[in-house]
Every structure is written in C-alpha cells, then in structure tokens.
Image: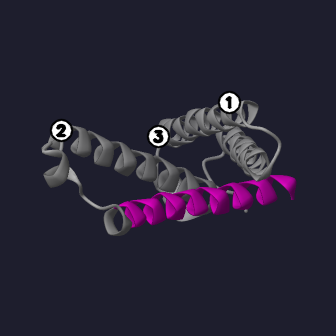
Amino acid sequence: MTTAFFRRAGAAILTLQIVYILLFEIAFMVLVIDTSEIDHSAPDRLGAAIFLATEIGAAIILLGAAAVLTLPRISGRIPRGGRAAFLCCCVIAQCAIAWMASSNAMKQDAGPDVLINAVMILLSLMVVVACVLGIRDDSGTVKV
C-alpha cells in the first residue's frame, strides 16, 4: 500500500512540476516585455534555443518518470534499462531541486520563502522515494 501511495503521489508531483514549467514559460512569453530594441541588443538565439531544449528535455524526463511510475502499459513497453534510466534521471533532477531549494532557504530570513522552499524539498524527496521504489520493482509491471 505505501509503495502504491508513493508511486501515485510521486507521479502527481511530477505532473505538477511539468504544469509549473509550462505556466512559467507562458508567463515569460506573455508578461515579459522585450526590451532588446530599447537596449540595442539583439536577443541571443543560441541561448534561447539551449534554454528551450533544456526545458523540453526536463519535461520529457519528468513526464516519462511519471508514466513509468503509474501507467502499466507504458511501463511494460519500456525495457528495464530504459525505466531505470528515466527514474535515475528523475532522481538526479529532484536531488538538484532539493539542493537548490535548501541553498535558497539557508540564504533567506525566516518567512514565507523558507516555508515554500521547505515544501519544495519535501515534495522532491517524496518523488525521490517514489523513483527509488520504482527502480526496485524488478517484475517489469507496475503494481498500483
């Protein structure tokens, strides 16, 4: 039961992280004013392309890990090494998120930002537990 809970909760958190990335991308496209004409600086196309590719790669890793954790049809089609690779990349990403949130929390005075960072750390660690439980599953099927 706890394995199923962690796997479902981990997939839900990963889905929320993907939605968070998409909302920020939409907010940057809609709300940020392009000042390159005023500043007389041309936008860096290579930097923008690398940033977009990084965002798409992160979304694919998070979405793939969520699918491996909860969808038996998708998990069954992916070889064991592929499932482990998705989940290991997700663990690395979540550890980086937890590290950055803890680093940010240590620099802040007590307040709402510290609470938000603590929630981020907690959710990231919950996803790490879900991914580790998913890696441990040797049967190739998801028991949800």
Dot 1 lies on which element? helix
Q: CA distance from mark 2 to mark 1?
A: 29 Å
Q: Residue 37's x, y, as percent?
A: 14, 53
How many labels sit on residues? 3
Q: Are marks 1 and 3 in contact (CB under 8 Å)?
A: no
Image depth: mark 1 or mark 3 in front: 1
Q: Provide the residue designation for mark 3.
A: 82
Q: Earlier in the sequence, mark 3 or mark 2?
A: 2
Q: Position of residue 124 (x, y in %)?
A: 69, 45
Question: Along the polypeptide, which appears first: circle 2 or circle 1?
Answer: 2
Q: Which residue is outermost to the right?
A: 1
Q: Secondary structure at mark 2?
A: helix
Q: Tag on residue 103?
A: 1
Above or below 31: residue 111: above
Percent position (x, y) of residue 83? 52, 43
In this view, which residue lies farthest toward the bottom?
30
Residue picked out by circle 2: 46
Q: Are marks 2 and 1 in contact (CB under 8 Å)?
A: no
Residue 65 is labelled as: none
Q: Is residue 14 located in the magenta-colored stretch of the structure?
A: yes
Above or below residue 81? Residue 6 is below
- Residue 143 can be seen in this image: no
Boundaries of the magenta span: 1-28
N-terminal-most mark, 1 or 3:
3
